[in-house]
Every structure is written in C-alpha cells, then in structure tokens.
Image (tube, rainbow, N blue to C red):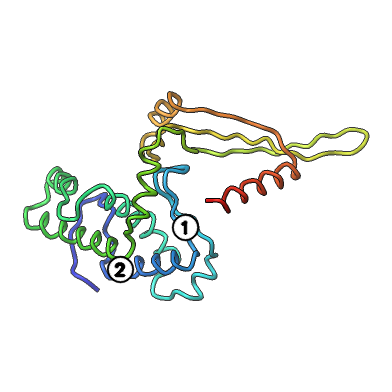
Amino acid sequence: MGKNYEFPVGFRFDSDLDLFKIAIDYTKELLDEDKIIIVYGFMRDITIKFLLTEREYEEKYTELSWTDYNDILKSEILTILEQNYNEPLEVEKGLIKYLIEEKVDEDSIKSISEFKLEKRRYAYQKLYSQKEKNRYFLKQNTISHKLSDIDYDFNRTIDEDGSVAYANIKIKTDDVLVDINLPKQLMNIISSNRSEEISFICDKYDLEYLIDELKRIQEKL
C-alpha cells in the first residue's frame, strides 16, 4: 500500500490512497451501470442511493468489502465531490488551517495536504462532469424549498364491515438543508425557522396513483 501518515484525531480522509482509488473506480462503474445514484439537495446536501444489494456488490467487487466501500464513499468521496464543485484543486486552505490548529508540524502539513489533493484530483478525473456540477448548483441556488424529511405511520379502521389499512404521511421541506453533523438542538432551531410541513392520509390505492404520477413526471425530465 501507500505511504504512512500520522493524521490528527478526527481527520476523515484517512483511507489508504490505493483503496480510495479503488473505491472511486467502483463508484464510477456503479454510476455508469445505474447501480447507484447521487442525489443533490434532496433530504441532505449530497447523498447516495444504492440500487444493488450487498450480496450483488460482494459477488462482483472483491478488492474492497461492502463495509469498507461504504465507509470511504460516505465519509470521503461524497465530501470531496462537493468540495470539487466549490473549490479549486490547487489549494487546501481549510485543511491547512485545521492542521495548524491541531499543532501538526510543517512537514506533515505539507505531506497531508498533498495526500488530500491527490485524492481530490483522482475523484475529479473519474467523477467530475459539468452536468453533475450543474445539478449540484441548481439545488444550491434555487429559492424553492427542498425535501428534507419523510415520515409515516400506519393505522387501520375497524368497523362492522371489516377494516381498512391506511398510512398517514408527513413531508417536510426547508429552504436550506441543515447539516446533519450539527448538534441536534441547533439543527432543530435552524430547521424550525425555515420549514414547511404537510401531512396527508392515503391507502394503498392512493399510493399506487401517486407513484404512477411521479413516474409520469420522471419520464418527462
């Protein structure tokens, strides 16, 4: 494997460079095969949806376990994708400031910064596209609210003619998605000032109708 680094406690981009590149290659292939999708500004700033099972992954990809791939994908790759849309590849000002605050020596600051930049460059080479950047900034710059949460509960009516099952669905939107890494109390304060909520009741036939309408919308995009 690659060079060893002494990272400060809490440094999230600490995976081995070779394994990181394998994870990037897997991500590129899975995206090309529509086995995963990247979602921007929908529930959170950036997230991933798997369209394959753990078993399907393990049968095809053997150099990186499902758990290790998920760890690198969610803790490093998604963050780097977002960073690459917003910051030039030649500088790591935020990282350097963080390393200085952590009392990292000058030589280590230089080597760790270059290590991180190498990851960013490889992610840029394999995963960056203007279309994806446009998707990201569409959600960042819109004045429309964005979906931030979906919740539901099930109930059943009971009368002399039998019972009917139904769901009560609650949908929440925000004009700015809250960083899930913030303290929960602060998240609630920010969210409560910008949120809109609706709730509605539906049975399985209503859901079938709704799903069909959403598919029609999807087909027209």
x and y percentages locating residue 197 in the rendered image: 55, 29
Q: Is residue 124 above or below residue 167?
A: below
Q: Which residue is mark 2?
A: 21
Q: What's under tag 2, amino acid-wise?
A: Lys
Quadrant in which the N terminus appears: bottom left
Residue 138: image location, x then y, percent: 38, 43
Measured from the top left, where is residue 152 in percent x and y? 63, 38
Residue at 50% in and 64% down: 35
Label 1, label 2: how far apart the Cα atoms are = 19 Å
- Which numbered tag is attached to residue 37? 1
Q: Amino acid at mark 1?
A: Ile
- For the residue pair 14 and 197, the one nearer the viewer reads as 197
Viewer-nearest residue: 79 or 219 = 219
Residue in view at x 76 percent, y 44 percent: 205
Of labels 1 and 2, earlier in sequence is 2
Local SS, label 1 = strand
